[in-house]
Image (cartoon, rainbow, N blue to C red):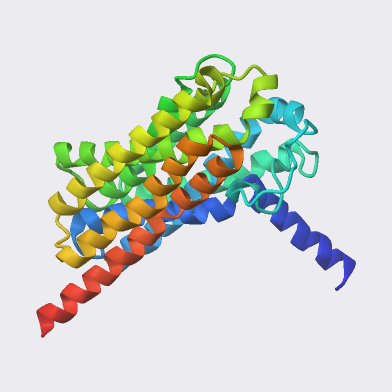
Amino acid sequence: MHIAQYFRISKIKLFLALSRTPHGLLDICTPLLVALLWLGSPPDSQTIVFGIIAAFAGYTAVYALNDIVDYKIDKKKIGQEGFDRDSSYLDGTHIRHPLARGFLSMPEAIVWAGGWAILSLFTSYLLNPVCAYILIIGCILEAIYCLLLRVSHLRVMVSGIVKTLGGLAAIFAVDASPQVDLLLLIFFWLFFWEIGGQNIPADWHDIEEDTTMQAKTVPVCFGPRIASTIVLITLTISLTLSGLVFRITPLQMPNIFYAAALLIGFFLLIIPAVKLFKARDRDFAASLFNRASWYPCILLALTLISILFNSVMGSG
């Protein structure tokens, strides 16, 4: 391989690592899933194309923004014992925090994040101006979330809100005047999934470094026992709400698919949460994070199969 080509590929991987693209690709499934649930069928092709572009660009920009705002903190974490230990942690794909490590410059990171943010704003606005406003709010809240690292453990609430915004934007992309009670139901379903399946496990993975940094995260402030209890409770609430979501939304899911959706949630959320509650170990937190990250993706696949099944049975 030519050396110039090698460095181009490496640079691309660094940018993808900055935006945690493997995780971002899984996150895109959330707005797609919510749109299908809300409509009960796929939207028109233009909405699908613009929606996918807006979602990918939005998640890419927001994850990069996280590393930009956390630049100084990440630099202090790097090199601490345990930070680079081998792990199957999803957000560690390629390399963690390439900006703080000096593999990318700050101007490069800002241009990367800004370019994707502009693309997401443009396509979001074409879907519905409200979607663009939601993206702006999401970026502001993500910055606030990062700045609260040494201030308050309640930053977990901010994270919960940020992660639901993609799903809420998807609703406004397909429905200009959504039903408020159903919108709130989906909001809290995703909100508790984010807290128990994403935020706290991610902070737990970094608990040793965060303790040294005197960070205010749930695992650091309350310890493993309370943190694991919160994880189990929030994921149980999320799974319970999912049962309502899949029954109340316009999607007419056959009972066998409905049962499968609940079983998927139990397997990906509750079982690893119980294991974390018993073991209270960093590796179990990473395992929960990874499995919970696949939750929207697998539900999306199940939902598409359900729609196809209904279409075949209806035409028959």
Image quarter where the C terminus lies is bottom left
Give coordinates of residue 44: x percent, y percent. Answer: 27, 66
- Within the image, what quadrant is residue 240 found in? top left
Q: Position of residue 45 (x, y in %)?
A: 31, 68
Residue drawn at (33%, 52%), measured in percent from left and top?
265
User: Quick check: can you spot residue 306?
Assistant: yes
Q: Is 134 left, or right, of 98 in this rendering?
A: left
Q: Is residue 227 left or right of residue 178?
A: right
Q: Nearer the viewer, residue 120 or 314?
A: 314
Comparing 208 with 277, the one in front is 277
User: How many marks do you count on the picture?
Assistant: 0
Q: Quadrant of the N terminus?
A: bottom right
Q: Is residue 277 above or below residue 149?
A: below
Point out the residue furthest to the right here: 3
Residue at image position (29%, 52%) is 34
In the image, farthest residue toward the front: 278
Residue 129 lies in quadrant? top left
Foreground of the two, 32 or 125: 32
The location of residue 102, given as percent across then percent down, is: 80, 39
Please, which residue is most extreme toward the bottom here? 316
Is any part of residue 133 visible from this angle?
Answer: no
Give percent across and percent down for residue 50: 39, 58
